[in-house]
Amino acid sequence: MLQNTIDSIAFNNNLRNINPKLKVIFAILSLFICVASKSVIVPLIITIIMIYLTLFKAKVPKKIYLTLFFPVFGFGLFTLIFMAFWYGTTEMYSFKIFGFTIGFYKEGLDMGLLVFSRMLGGVASTLFLALTTPMTEIFYILRSLGLPSVVVDIAMMMYRYIFVLLDELIRMQNAQETRLGYKDLKTTYKSLGMLASNLFIRTWEKGEQLFITMSSRGYDGELRILGEIENPKLIYMIGIILFEIILVIISYLTMDFKPI
């Protein structure tokens, strides 16, 4: 279900006809620069640009995008708060709870903001690539770049089996809900226990069925991707490289910038 939604968006967005090699290079370079940046400014710039391209250029549905983006946003916010309270020496604020003094530290807040901005930039770059480029094209490009076939095949199988697991989870939850499996707290705990105990077995069976289906269609240990992707025009490659160089320069110039 979720896989079908993501694949459908990847095949039917407004950036679908842009050369996928350009999108892969743009997203991966931006991701690396974002993670390596020692300033919060560059990751935030990357986040804004990627969100703009994904929502307003590719026209990806906002509800789907926010569903994928907000869990990471929440986790990053939790990390920011945790680091601000537990890391550093320069105390900005403190309060007592049950006799324990909890401090709010400047170094922790600075580090938390950097980690938070990196997370946002990395997720925004990944979602841009995943929601504008079909996974089959991404795997084809990775193989053409010299990545070992076995690594690409494992990645493709993992991608498929993750959604087999999710689809089976949703199907079992729906079946339990139709039988009032979550009508009260006691029944909910019982249903969740049954769900957890049976989910892996059901997913394993689905995987076995998928493998048998693939074998009956000639699978010999290597997944072959049909088609060929042409190389992008040089002018576009130069534009992307110049953009990434500008990001590196900004990162260097703002290396010592502290938001607090």
Image: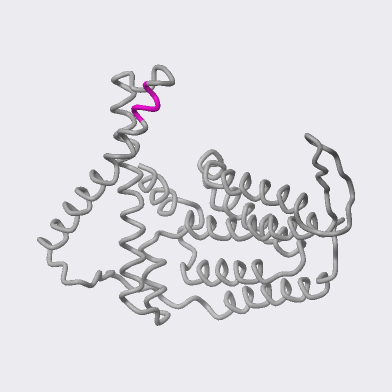
Q: Over which residues does the magenta segment extend? A: 187-191
Q: Position of residue 195 (x, y in %)?
A: 32, 35
Q: Residue furthest left?
A: 216
Q: Position of residue 72 (x, y in %)?
A: 58, 49
Magenta span dominant secondary structure: helix
Q: Quadrant of the N terminus?
A: top left
Above or below residue 187? Residue 45 is below
Q: At 56% across and 44% down in the image, what residue appears? A: 71
Query: How many labels were placed on the picture?
Result: 0
Residue nearest the viewer, comparing 122 with 106: 106
Above or below residue 44? Residue 189 is above
Residue nearest the viewer, comparing 147 with 158: 158
Residue nearest the viewer, comparing 68 with 13: 68
Image side of residue 137 versus residue 247, left or right: left
Q: At 62% across and 79% down in the image, what residue appears? A: 238
Q: At 10% across and 61% down in the image, what residue appears? A: 216
Q: Position of residue 171 (x, y in %)?
A: 30, 35
